[in-house]
Image (cartoon, rainbow, N blue to C red):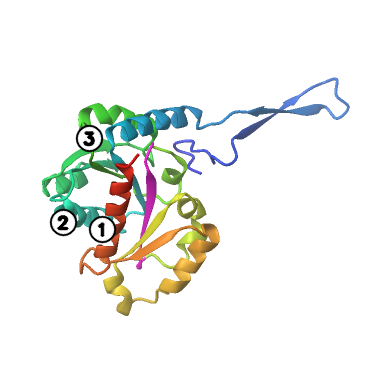
Amino acid sequence: MCDSCHCGDSSQPAVTLEFPVQDQPHGSRKIVVERDVLDKNNALATTNRQFFNQQRILALNLLSSPGSGKTSLLERTVQELKGEMAISVIEGDQQTSRDAERIRATGASALQINTGSGCHLDAEMIHRALPHMKPLPHSLLFIENVGNLVCPALFDLGEAAKVAIISVTEGEDKPQKYPYLFRAASLCLINKIDLLPYLDFDLALCQELARQVNPALQFIALSAKSGEGLADWYQWLRHKFDHSHQH
C-alpha cells in the first residue's frame, strides 16, 4: 500500500473506526464502516470498458517495475505490427514525456500522462485522456502504466487484460513479493532472456512461484532486443485482437 497516494487493498475494502463511548463497560466500542474505496474508480472503469467494447478497441494495461524493458518492447511491437492494425499508446510516468516521444518516433499515436507524485494510473485519468487520444475504432490501445509493482495492479482502468512484464535481471521471487500484480494479470512476459547465460535466474522457478499465486497465468519468455519469443507475443496479441472484434 502506498501512503503517498492512499492506495487501498481492493480485496479488503472495510474501514474500521473505533470511538470512545463512556457508557460502555469497557469504555469503547467498534463501529465498522464498510465502503469500497475503489467505487469511484470502478464506476469510471466500467464506463471506459463500455467505450472500448462499443468501439471494438482492445485496451491492454501493461504493468512492470522501472527498467523491465516495457517501453523498448512497445517500440518493437508497434514497429512490427503497425502494418496489421492501428495502434495507439497512453504513457504513464511521474515526470517527463520521453516514453511518449519514443513511441511517436515509431509512427504510432501516443499521449503522455504525468502523475506527479502519484504511483499509478487510474480510471479517471484514462477517461479524461480518451477524448484527446481519440483511438481509432477497431484498434489496439496499449496503456503503459507507471513503473510500480504494487499500486497499479489494484486499479481497474477498463482494460481487457492486464499484462505483467518482468525481466530476468529482477530475480525469480517477484511473484512472492508482489502477488497482487501476478494475481491480476492474464499474461506474464519475462523479458531480457538474452541475458540468461550471464545471470543466476531460474525461469522455471519464476513461473512456478507465479502459478502458486495465479494458476491460470500464461507466460511468454522473450527478448525485445534479440527478438526471441516475440512471435509468441504477437500471436497472443492477434488472438486477443481478433476475439475483441467478435463481440
The answer to whether any part of residue 170 appears in the image is: yes
Q: Residue furthest bottom?
A: 197
Which of the numbered marks, if any, corresponds to residue 221? Answer: none
Mark 3 and mark 1: Cα distance apart in space: 20 Å
Say which residue appears at 49% left-offset and 62% top-offset: 210
Vertical side of 169 occupied by 72: above or below: above
Q: Position of residue 64 (x, y in %)?
A: 36, 53
Q: Position of residue 128 (x, y in %)?
A: 30, 27
Q: How many marks?
A: 3
Disc 2 target residue: 80
Instruction: Give SS at disc 3.
Output: loop
Which of 117 and 155 lies nearest the eye of the viewer?
155
Say which residue appears at 51% left-offset and 57% top-offset: 214
Rate crowding at label 2 as few (under 14), some (14 to 19) or many (20 or more) other CA atoms within 10 Å. few
Q: Which three-letter amino acid code belongs to the residue tagged 1? A: Tyr
Q: Which residues are magenta?
A: 158-169
Q: Residue furthest top?
A: 23
Mark 3 and mark 2: Cα distance apart in space: 20 Å
Q: Position of residue 46 (x, y in %)?
A: 42, 31
Q: Which three-letter amino acid code belongs to the residue tagged 2? A: Glu
Vertical side of 113 occupied by 240: above or below: below
Which of the numbered marks, if any, corresponds to residue 137? Answer: 3
Q: Name which of mark 3 and mark 2 comes first in the sequence.
A: 2
Q: Residue furthest front?
A: 246
Q: Which three-letter amino acid code belongs to the residue tagged 3? A: Pro
Q: Residue furthest right?
A: 25
